[in-house]
Image (spheres, grey):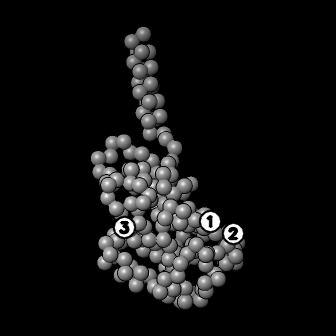
């Protein structure tokens, strides 16, 4: 009888532990993308009273052009991680400059279809990022180097003179630079 009780208590403890960690992804600031999870034991967390100024230098291309780029989704995760920690959306000042191999993530559906035979899976993520207040730029130099024109890119994206000058404009203004 004691063995059965001990086994039952052990099983109940395992089930409780599993239920504690088996949670659904959360999307506090960027709806539907960049799902993140609460980590109740975390002792280091973003300070919800701070203003966050973040410049994302995105140059890494997608692993599979038929799937959302993990780097685009990572911007959504960045936002959502801060939001889950209690940082209000108005305290998040995020700018993304896309260049290099990542430039194809900002193509409009027509141009993306020509290259990959699918709609651009990144555009809904970029829309959700814009809705969350993220400014997204494409490097004009990268566009020229790849013979892309304004009509080839999504209207969600603003054209910058260059990634280099966008970064050197915002970093001196206190933006933290992240490289994706």
Residue at the extreme left of the image, as rendered: 43
> Element under label 3?
strand
Q: Which residue is mark 1?
A: 121
Across and down, in percent, residue 164 comes to 40, 83
Residue at 44%, 15% (x, y): give it.
4
Q: Alpha carbon of mark 3 to alpha carbon of mark 2: how far?
A: 34 Å
Q: 150 or 113, which is in the foreground?
A: 150
Quadrant housing the C terminus: bottom left
For the point 51% across and 47% down, the residue is 25
Q: Secondary structure at mark 1?
A: loop
User: What is the crowding at mark 3: few (fewer than 14 residues within 10 Å), some, or many (at least 20)?
Assistant: some
Residue 104 pos. (x, y %): 57, 76
Rendered location of residue 86, percent (x, y): 39, 50
Residue where numbered disc 2 is placed: 118
Label 3 belongs to which residue?
Answer: 53
In the rendered structure, the answer to whether residue 4 lies left or right of residue 48 reads: right
Asked if one can make out residue 113 in the rendered structure from this viewpoint, the answer is yes
**Left or right: 154, with 72 as reference point:** right
The numbered mark, 3 or 1, whose residue comes first in the sequence reads: 3
Q: Nearer the viewer, mark 3 or mark 2?
A: 3
Answer with the quarter of the image where residue 5 lies.
top left
Using the rendered image of the protein, determine whether residue 59 is visible from the camera's viewpoint: no
Q: Position of residue 69 (x, y in %)?
A: 54, 66
| Residue appearing at x 49%, y 83% in the figure | 160
Instruction: Identify whether 154 is placed above or below 164.
Output: above
Separation of residues labelled 1 and 2 (CA atoms): 8 Å
- Closest to the camera, between mark 3 and mark 1, is 3
Pointer 1 with pointer 2, Cβ within 8 A: yes
How far apart marks 3 and 1 lie (CA) works out to 27 Å
Number of the label disc, if any, that sits on residue 5: none
Label 2 SS: loop
* Residue at the far front in the pictured view: 90
């Amino acid at each position: 009888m004691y063995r059965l009780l001990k086994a039952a208590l052990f099983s109940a403890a395992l089930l409780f532990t599993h239920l504690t960690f088996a949670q659904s992804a959360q999307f506090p600031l960027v709806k539907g993308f960049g799902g993140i999870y609460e980590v109740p034991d975390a002792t280091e967390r973003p300070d919800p009273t701070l203003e966050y100024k973040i410049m994302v230098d995105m140059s890494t291309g997608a692993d599979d052009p038929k799937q959302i780029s993990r780097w685009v989704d990572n911007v959504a995760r960045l936002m959502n991680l801060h939001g889950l920690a209690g940082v209000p959306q108005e305290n998040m000042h995020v700018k993304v400059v896309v260049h290099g191999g990542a430039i194809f993530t900002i193509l409009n559906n027509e141009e993306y279809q020509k290259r990959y035979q699918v709609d651009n899976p990144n555009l809904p993520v970029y829309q959700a990022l814009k809705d969350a207040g993220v400014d997204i730029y494409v490097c004009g130099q990268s566009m020229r180097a790849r013979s892309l024109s304004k009509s080839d890119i999504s209207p969600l994206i603003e054209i910058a003179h260059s990634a280099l000058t966008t970064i050197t404009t915002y970093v001196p203004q206190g933006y933290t630079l992240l490289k994706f």
